[in-house]
Amino acid sequence: MDRTMVEKHLQQAREHVAAGELHLARQREIVAELIDRGADVTEANRLLMNFEESQIMHVAHLDRLKAELLALASGS
């Protein structure tokens, strides 16, 4: 991939990671609210786990793109 494309993908990956952090924070709030109400949190926890797994993948993708950009900058 050329530098311009990597930079574009890197920006998109940063946006995905930022959005993921917001989703995680909100879902944690929802779980806490449900717990406070004494409600069943099974589905809310399942969704939180899915968000956490997605975030791990988003961060890994971001890291790979950063490494690719560094490799392009160093001529490797």
Image (tube, rainbow, N blue to C red):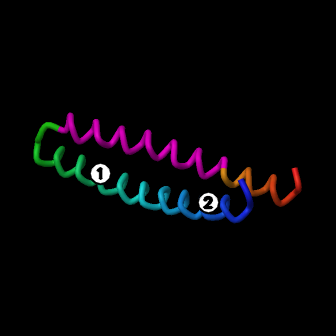
Mark 1 or 2: in front is: 2
Where does residue 54 sit, x and y in percent of width and height? 44, 43
Q: Which one is in front, 33 or 4?
A: 4
Task: Give the residue at x 35% y 55%.
Answer: 23
Where does residue 62 sit, x and y in percent of width and height? 60, 52
Q: Earlier in the sequence, mark 1 or mark 2?
A: 2
Where does residue 34 sit, x and y in percent of width and height? 16, 47
Q: Which residues are magenta?
A: 41-64
Which residue was labeled with disc 2?
A: 10
Q: Is residue 60 left or right of residue 75?
A: left
Q: Does the stretch in magenta take in 57? A: yes
Q: Amino acid at mark 1?
A: Gln
Where does residue 9 sit, x and y in percent of width and height? 59, 59
User: What SS does tag 2 mark?
Assistant: helix
Task: Give the residue at x 66% y 47%.
Answer: 64
Q: Quadrant of residue 74?
A: bottom right
Q: Is residue 16 left or right of residue 47?
A: right
Q: Does the stretch in magenta take in 52? A: yes
Mark 2, Cα crowd under 10 Å, few <14 / some 14-19 / many 20+, is many
Q: Quadrant of residue 3?
A: bottom right
User: What SS does tag 1 mark?
Assistant: helix
The label on residue 27 is 1
Q: Amino acid at mark 2?
A: Leu
Q: Which one is in front, 14 or 31?
A: 14
Q: Is residue 33 left or right of residue 62?
A: left
Q: Quadrant of residue 46?
A: top left
Mark 1, Cα crowd under 10 Å, few <14 / some 14-19 / many 20+, is some
Q: Is residue 75 left or right of residue 62?
A: right
Q: Is residue 46 above or below residue 29?
A: above
Q: Is residue 20 above or below residue 40?
A: below
Task: Give the residue at x 19% y 52%.
Answer: 33
Q: CA distance from mark 1 to mark 2?
A: 25 Å
